[in-house]
Amino acid sequence: MQSRAHVAGLLLLSSLLLLLFSSLTKSASPLQALSRACTPSANLHKQPTLNVFVTDLPPELNYGLLHEYWDFQRSSDTEKSSTDTGRSSSISRVKISTGEFLTKSVHIPLYPDDPLIKQYSAEYWLLGDLITPANERSNSVARRVWNSSLADVIFVPFFATLSAELQLHQAKGKFRHKKENADYDRQVRVLELVKNSPEWKRSQGRDHVFVLTDPVAMWHVRSEIAPAVLLTVDFGGWYMEDAKEVENQEGPLDVISHRQVSLLKDVIVPYTHLLPPLHPADDKQRGTLLYFKGARHRHRTGLVRDKLWALLKDEPGVVFEEGFPNKTGREQALKGMRSADFCLHPAEFSLFVAVHNALQPKFLVNYLKGISAQRKRSMRTRLANAQQFFEYDNGYPGGIGPVKGAVNAIWNKVSDKVPAIKEAVARERRKPLDVSVPARCQCL
Ligand SMILES: *[C@@H]1O[C@H](CO)[C@@H](O)[C@H](O)[C@H]1NC(C)=O
Ligand SMILES: *[C@@H]1O[C@H](CO)[C@@H](O)[C@H](O)[C@H]1NC(C)=O
């Protein structure tokens, strides 16, 4: 299911040794969401309020999927029957649209523990914030409004990642097809419900927010939700198709005209990190220069990674390990990252190295050895300060309670989009009937 593309031309290295562990499949920086908020106190000062109206979707399109996931896990793996999955039969009482459902008895299951899914859990924490009773969410930037005419944005509470992953778990072969694909059916259902709402008709979807962290979320209906604000971890899932178009153009390949995503309308959100944070005080002497753990060969992409692997695997001080993000892999990664000065990593606070340089023998090793202890210390301090903006999990079941940094950083970033959305909606309204204006490339 890994389908993200590798960004051409840049290789990212980081002294970030505490956050994400995945198979290094990310391409662009996932931290755009945080760029405005890199001081420790930033989320204590609430930014502007974002008025959010939540679309009325039935529970089988969000929390019901969690029940389905855990039921499926139980039936397919009886040995794991003791896992704490928070089974509950109270799902029928959940009524997100009115907020009435928040009775004490409602219990929201945990988000899947499987790292391949958990890394995309933003949908769970964002909705958790929105359904938290108002008196417990005074630190959230988002304010829930019950009349959509008061809203800045319309949040669509579809767990698109979980829907896709469920299908991939249950019948992977059907995923790209429309037949016998429950995920596809759900996508169509969401689309029907949303597009028939007065809110969508008013804005053509421009003020709607979809959480699409998994690169294959909403895969079959992307073009139809393209006008909306998409919360994604990068544009890798769109890159291959958009790059193909570029290949057919004449001239230099220096512009990729994304047709459905844009830094102007969308928000790049952090992955959910899977390893516990490292407090700077617990940092130990690091003996390895460069560490990487993940899959050497990737589905469709990862060409640079493969070359680097061949070039660097026997260098002293460099460790490349094949690995899978299960329990063993997680422990190995934790140890490996904490013993290394640098990791191949997609995050910000990175060193950026051009691919053509990195693929020169010795270049990377010499470059990294040349970085002073003082610079490494200062990068690590910045990372420690920024750590809170990666934190989704607020420690409350279902995420129902005061928010952590990642959720607010995302709301802030969405709130930055609001003036442009309002302008686009106003322009649309002014347009004569039966005139269509082609979507333009927003080449940033
Ligand atoms: C929502 O607000 C608008 C504008 O203030 C008002 O006209 C409308 O009646 C309200 N709708 C409901 C259902 O309260
Ligand atoms: C983790 O994955 C690796 C590679 O697929 C496998 O060899 C190992 O047994 C797995 N470990 C656990 C605890 O599942």
Image (cartoon, grey):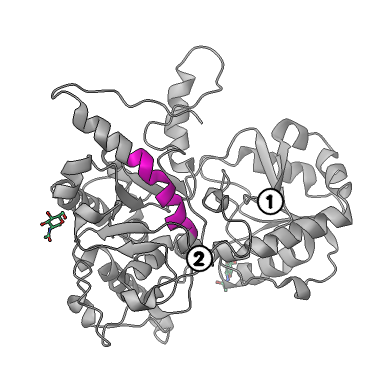
Across and down, in percent, residue 342 comes to 76, 55
Q: Secondary structure at mark 2?
A: helix
Can you tell which of label 1 and label 2 is closer to the viewer?
1
Across and down, in percent, residue 256 comes to 49, 27
Q: Is residue 434 left or right of residue 29?
A: left
Q: Nearer the viewer, residue 430 or 127?
A: 430
Label 1 CB sits under 8 Å from any ligand 2 atom: no
Residue at (32%, 27%) from the top-left corner? 439
Where does label 2 land, which residue? 115
Label ID, residue 170? none
Tell me the kind of residue under disc 1: Phe
> How many numbered discs?
2
Residue at (50%, 62%) from the top-left corner? 406
Q: Is residue 59 left or right of residue 15?
A: left
Tell me the kind of residue under disc 2: Pro
Q: Is residue 23 left or right of residue 127?
A: right
Asked if residue 215 can be seen in this view, the reply is: no
Where does label 1 land, which residue? 349
Ligand 1 position by quadrant: bottom left
Magenta stretch encompasses residue 24: no
